[in-house]
Amino acid sequence: MSGSLDRRSLLLGAGTATVVAGLGAGTIAVAQKSAKPADPFGERDYSTARVSTKYRFNDPDMDLFFVIALAWSDTGGLSPGELFYVAQSIKDGDADSWVTAFQASGERQDKQADEWKAKGWKRQSAQARFKAFASYRSAWQFAPLGAVFESIYAKQQTAFKLAVQDSGLPATFFKVPYKGKHLPGVFLQNPNKNAPVVLCLGGADTGYEETLFTVGRNVFDAGYSVALADLPGQGITMKDDLHWEMEPEKPIGAIVDLLVADFGAKPGHMAMMGYSLGGYWATRAAGHEKRFATVIASTPFPRPVELVTASRALYRQMAASGRRPSTATLRNNAVIYWKAGVPDQDEEQLEQRLGRFVADPQIVTVPFLSIVGGGEGNTFQQQSDSWNAEIRSTRKKLVRLDAATGGADHCQAANRLRLAQEMTGWMDEIFKS
């Protein structure tokens, strides 16, 4: 539609002083001084960048999801060597070349997994299959909606399930009944049956499977049972007409019901974390779902609409200057509107819908850990600060990570281990106190 809000501008902050992180998983903000700094990367536009360092691509959307994929190498994704090989076939900003390159990687890894499985190399086969999953997951990020997107997503689901089955992980897949449909997930049972259960939720761009790489595996290794699940609007739930909800505590409550009934989770002996837009799920759940002993957010995101509102004036400036988003940005934008349940990419309807997404700090008394990257923009910094100050919890903490930690970017996109370390250290104190 004329004047529609592209995903890049959606994720921007107000004015020229600050750029704000976005709704998706691992989106990153860059604080910008009034004087534009020298640009060592030539084409990169720091007014719209969501990574504080260029990792591979000038296109900010591509670079963001490249570094996310790179961080997964620590927990089972493609190795740096494999990723940089894939990147050689990608034209900066061109969505089709990205999709083609990552699909080809998935097919190579699937073939390798099949060959090793036929030889009886079950462990090695599972490792290759996880890499196939990671490849398909990256591929759909910029795929066109419809048959191509759904085909790649189906390959991702198949690869993940095969990998989990052959890996030896103590994993059980589940489906949570919700509004006549279901929310998919997987439960990792710690050998210690009395271990606390941690529900991990991703953000706008995520499906539950990738949350295993982002935080789930590291949290499981730290001694916890882990549940990963999709809320409405995550994964591929949009095909069932499930979209982001103002009251995520309702589907979260349904997931907790199942964890208690089917997996022996104990109220008061559970935790929840959410990252990126999951920071909204977390802030809402903290005030409504009473079975969690603690809630964690990276970052707290109680008022998502502020990003949309702040971006509109800046978008008009961009359009007036003749700047056009890449095909990668446009494709990703279409997926975001689909997840939000907003037809025709109507920016006013998106703003109205997200305007009802508000978490009240005054009803939150549960122990709450807030994590924010020091390189994020003012909106996330301010929401994190105000949330931590205003919640009524007597036990609360705000962790701000600087560049030296590798965790300064949104949701610690370049150092997911640090995110899990902050989480598990906090939870160790909560559950041992």
Image (cartoon, rainbow, N blue to C red):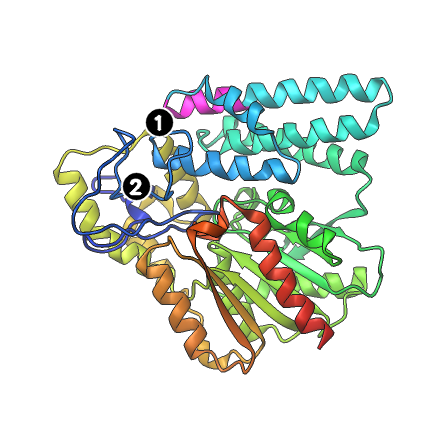
Q: Secondary structure at mark 1?
A: loop
Residue 117 falls in image quadrant? top right
Q: Which mark is residue 93?
A: 1
Residue 140 in the image: state x and y as whole percent: 51, 32
The answer to whether 92 appears left or right of 188 in the picture is left
Q: Which mark is residue 294?
A: none
Residue 139 in the image: state x and y as whole percent: 52, 29
Judge by depth and name the residue closer to the eye, 275 or 4.
275
Q: Is residue 366 visible?
A: yes
Q: Quadrant of the N terminus?
A: top left
The numbered mark, 2 or 1, whose residue comes first in the sequence reads 2
Residue 8 in the image: state x and y as whole percent: 31, 42
Q: Residue at x 51, y 26 (%)?
A: 148
Q: Secondary structure at mark 2?
A: loop
The answer to whether 292 appears left or right of 225 in the picture is left
Q: Residue at x 51, y 50 (%)?
A: 233
Whether the residues at callouts 2 and 1 have beta carbons within 8 Å, the answer is no
Identify the magenta region: 92-102
Q: Which mark is residue 6?
A: 2
Residue kind at label 2, given as amino acid type? Asp
Query: Callout 1 environment at 10 Å: few (<14), some (14 to 19), or many (20+)?
Result: many
In the image, farthest residue toward the left? 320
Query: Callout 2 environment at 10 Å: few (<14), some (14 to 19), or many (20+)?
Result: many
Q: Residue at x 82, y 40 (%)?
A: 168
